[in-house]
Structure formats: structure tokens, C-alpha cells
């Protein structure tokens, strides 16, 4: 089985005022987290301040377009979560 962990990791995107971002909320976009222009469920984001967003690319998040960690299997405790976070898995 091929290692597809790079494909399922969330995208950290820096957004700035004046930019326009069309983000997927349905999970069917071939270019996650970006959405196609014809999708009625897309979120059109006009940032009011500079910030970083953690965007889902696996389409499993319950809070699309934002990542909720659904790409990772559950772990037992806080120490294990931090260990997984710093290892990049």
C-alpha cells in the first residue's frame, strides 16, 4: 500500500485582507481545500485580518473546510497527541 499521509495532512494557509478564497464544504472537490466555481456549497472567504487557517484536505472533517483532525486515528492521551503532532503523522 502506498503511503498517502502527505495527501491527507491539512493545509496551513495564511490569508490576508483583500484576498478572496473559495473553500470546499461538501468534500467532493478534486482540489481540496479549494472549491470549484460551480459548487453551491462553497464557502467564499473574505479575510478581515491576516491569519492562518488549518484547512482539511482529506474530506473527512465534520467542520469543512476546516480540519478537525479526522485524518488521524484517535490516541489515548494528551502526551500522545503532542507526540503525533510533532512527528507530523
Image: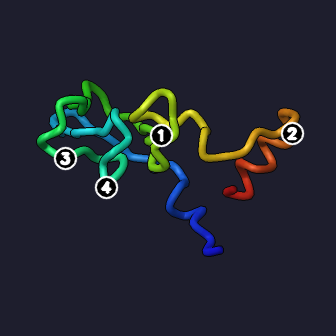
Q: Nearer the viewer, residue 61 or 12?
A: 61
How many C-alpha atoms fall within 10 Å of the one at disc 1: few (<14), some, or many (≥20)? some
Q: Which residue matches tag 4?
A: 30
Between discs 2 and 4, the one toward the N terminus: 4
Q: Which residue sits at x=21%, y=31%?
A: 44
Closer to the camera: disc 3 or disc 2?
A: 3
Tell me the distance, in whole angstroms, between the alpha carbons under discs 3 and 4.
Answer: 8 Å
Task: Evaluate if marks 3 and 4 touch, with contact meaning CB atoms under 8 Å apart.
Answer: yes
Mark 4 lies on a secondary structure that is loop
Between discs 1 and 4, the one toward the N terminus: 4
User: What x and y, as percent, mark residue 83?
Assistant: 81, 49
What is the number of the mark on residue 79?
Answer: 2
Task: Evaluate if marks 3 and 1 touch, with contact meaning CB atoms under 8 Å apart.
Answer: no
Q: Which residue matches tag 3?
A: 36
User: What x and y, as percent, mark residue 69?
Assistant: 61, 38
What is the number of the mark on residue 54?
Answer: 1
Q: Quadrant of residue 53?
A: top left
Tell me the distance, in whole angstroms, between the alpha carbons under discs 2 and 4.
Answer: 34 Å
Between discs 3 and 2, the one toward the N terminus: 3
Mark 3 lies on a secondary structure that is loop
Q: Quadrant of residue 26?
A: top left
Tell me the distance, in whole angstroms, between the alpha carbons under discs 1 and 4.
Answer: 18 Å
Tell me the distance, in whole angstroms, between the alpha carbons under discs 2 and 1.
Answer: 21 Å
Q: Nearer the viewer, residue 1 or 36?
A: 1
Q: Quadrant of the N terminus?
A: bottom right
Amino acid at each position: 500500500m502506498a503511503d498517502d499521509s502527505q495527501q491527507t495532512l491539512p493545509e496551513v494557509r495564511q490569508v490576508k485582507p483583500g484576498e478572496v478564497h473559495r473553500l470546499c464544504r461538501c468534500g467532493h472537490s478534486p482540489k481540496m481545500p479549494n472549491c470549484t466555481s460551480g459548487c453551491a456549497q462553497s464557502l467564499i472567504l473574505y479575510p478581515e485580518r491576516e491569519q492562518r487557517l488549518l484547512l482539511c484536505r482529506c474530506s473527512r472533517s465534520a467542520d469543512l473546510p476546516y480540519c478537525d483532525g479526522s485524518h488521524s486515528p484517535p490516541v489515548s492521551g494528551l502526551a500522545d497527541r503532542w507526540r503525533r503532532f510533532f512527528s507530523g503523522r
